[in-house]
Image: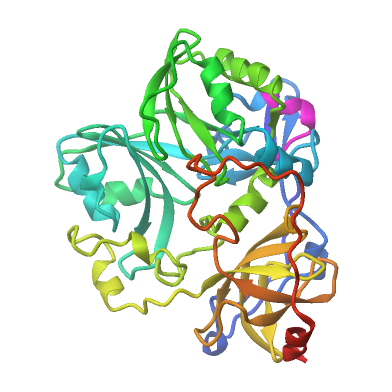
């Protein structure tokens, strides 16, 4: 038996904030001791008959036991634990498994159910994208905004029936938001106790075909969901994921024998090279694909327009929350990709040009494919864009040149995730870097 516990907890000295010189987007001062620490949640054996338990705020995926042999570490995500680190493979190995073979990841995504005669009416109020166009059997990317047009969180909406929806949300609190705006509506908001796992990579559909009791779904389009028969059980799967590789997700319901199904997927997948992965299994790929992470790449201080999500706003679908603010908002995107020369960027307000701070690095890692640091950045202004040469603080303590680029960094039409492109990379295709005559622009 295991309990979960915070791996490290340190309180920094209090800092005094000058309200006349306070910038909410600026990285706050940090005690030097904290810069040398990482914070994690670890599973620990239960001790005695009165264990210390934090389970009320840390819900555990039913298949977490599969990860325990690999010294896992977790973070809290949408009220659930999600694996951040495991010892079974390096980050580079996890990346290549996703790109060349297949990975299995148990997520912290949290589906909530919105059902009843006024379910659609509530969701049209919550989301700025027209929910009425989502047919039963289809999924839709959605996000919610505050009244000021800034973002709460995002996720995947499944129309399970005409008057019943699941929204598998990313990190953040939407449950209270649903309830606050459901007053006077005939709608029930509940937790269906559904858990999501992802199977991603070029061999993912091959594995699915082997697992099903019947032939593959037909049609089976990107963003479809369907109920299938697997090992004698009815399970819901969707053609979605968070890697922009070919893949599918499975929604384990309370009536499913989750352990039997999970062990079956792992056992059969292992025969095709599949491994369990943590966050490093998709972080680089989703950065390269321009898939934004809630709380990092967008926050309660950014509008959908400023982070490049304006195309998902439908002003004709009704009076959704934040509509008035978004109608008058600046519609320029200030979010870009970035490639770093010879290192990995430090997250935070570490972007500079001509010695001046120009923005934030919101997500960052190393790309084994492009053989350079890759990042998602959010600029303070609109005066520079794709192709701009900037400087950024590196995780090695140095300063590195970097170049802003469009997102996604490759496969702009999304042909990999749709199964149109079946070319599997044999190995790295290094970024050419910054031309010498352009590198001098920052001098």
Q: Left of 146 or right of it: where is 75?
A: right
Q: Residue 140 at what x, y percent from top left?
A: 35, 45
Residue 26, quarter of the rendered image: bottom right
Residue at image coords 47%, 10%: 213
- Give the quadrant of the C terminus: bottom right
Residue at image coords 54%, 28%: 205
Q: Nearer the viewer, residue 375 or 7?
A: 375
Q: Residue 201 at what x, y percent from top left?
A: 61, 36
Residue 323, quarter of the rendered image: bottom left
* In the image, residue 256 above or below residue 156: above
Residue at image coords 50%, 63%: 298
* In the image, residue 226 above or below residue 34: above
* In the image, residue 436 above or below residue 249: below
Q: Nearer the viewer, residue 60 or 368?
A: 368
- Specify whether residue 71 is painted magenta: yes
Q: Left of 144 or right of it: where is 365?
A: right
Residue 145, quarter of the rendered image: bottom left
Q: Residue 388 at what x, y percent from top left?
A: 63, 81
- Give the quadrant of the N terminus: top right
Residue at image coords 75%, 31%: 44
Q: Specify the segment rendered in magenta.
A: 66-74
Q: Look at the image and tell me whether residue 174 can be seen.
A: yes
């Amino acid at each position: 038996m295991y309990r979960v516990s915070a791996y490290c907890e340190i309180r920094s000295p209090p800092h005094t904030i000058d309200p006349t010189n306070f910038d909410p987007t600026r990285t706050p001062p940090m005690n030097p001791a904290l810069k040398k620490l990482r914070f994690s949640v670890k599973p620990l054996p239960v001790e005695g008959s009165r264990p210390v338990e934090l389970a009320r705020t840390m819900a555990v995926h039913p298949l977490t036991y599969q990860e325990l042999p690999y010294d896992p570490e977790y973070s809290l995500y949408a009220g659930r634990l999600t694996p951040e680190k495991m010892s079974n493979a390096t980050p580079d190995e996890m990346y290549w498994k996703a790109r060349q073979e297949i990975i299995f990841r148990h997520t912290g995504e949290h589906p909530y159910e919105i059902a009843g005669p006024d379910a659609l009416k509530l969701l049209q109020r919550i989301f700025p994208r027209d929910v009425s166009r989502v047919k039963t059997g289809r999924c839709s990317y959605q996000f919610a905004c505050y009244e000021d047009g800034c973002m709460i969180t995002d996720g995947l909406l499944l129309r399970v029936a005409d008057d019943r929806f699941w929204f598998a949300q990313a990190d953040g609190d939407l449950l209270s938001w649903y309830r606050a705006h459901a007053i006077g509506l005939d709608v029930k908001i509940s937790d269906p106790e559904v858990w999501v796992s992802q199977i991603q990579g070029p061999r993912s559909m091959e594995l699915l075909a082997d697992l099903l009791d019947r032939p593959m779904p037909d049609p089976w389009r990107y963003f479809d969901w369907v109920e299938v028969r697997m090992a004698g059980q009815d399970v819901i799967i969707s053609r979605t994921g968070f890697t922009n590789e070919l893949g599918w997700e499975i929604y384990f319901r309370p009536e499913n024998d989750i352990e039997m199904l999970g062990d079956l997927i792992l056992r059969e997948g292992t025969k095709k090279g599949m491994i369990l992965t943590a966050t490093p299994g998709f972080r680089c790929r989703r950065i390269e694909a321009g898939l934004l992470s809630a709380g990092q790449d967008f926050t309660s201080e950014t509008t959908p327009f400023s982070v490049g999500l304006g195309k998902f706003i439908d002003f004709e679908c009704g009076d959704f929350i934040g509509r008035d603010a978004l109608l008058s908002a600046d519609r320029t995107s200030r979010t870009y990709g970035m490639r770093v020369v010879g290192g990995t960027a430090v997250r935070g307000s570490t972007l500079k040009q001509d010695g001046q701070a120009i923005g934030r690095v919101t997500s960052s890692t190393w790309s084994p494919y492009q053989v350079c640091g890759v990042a998602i950045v959010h600029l303070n202004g609109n005066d520079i864009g794709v192709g701009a040469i900037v400087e950024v603080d590196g995780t090695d303590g140095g300063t590195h040149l970097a170049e802003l680029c469009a997102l996604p960094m490759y496969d702009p039409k999304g042909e990999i995730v749709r199964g149109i492109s079946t070319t599997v990379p044999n190995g790295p295709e290094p970024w050419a870097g910054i031309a010498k005559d352009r590198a001098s622009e920052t001098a």
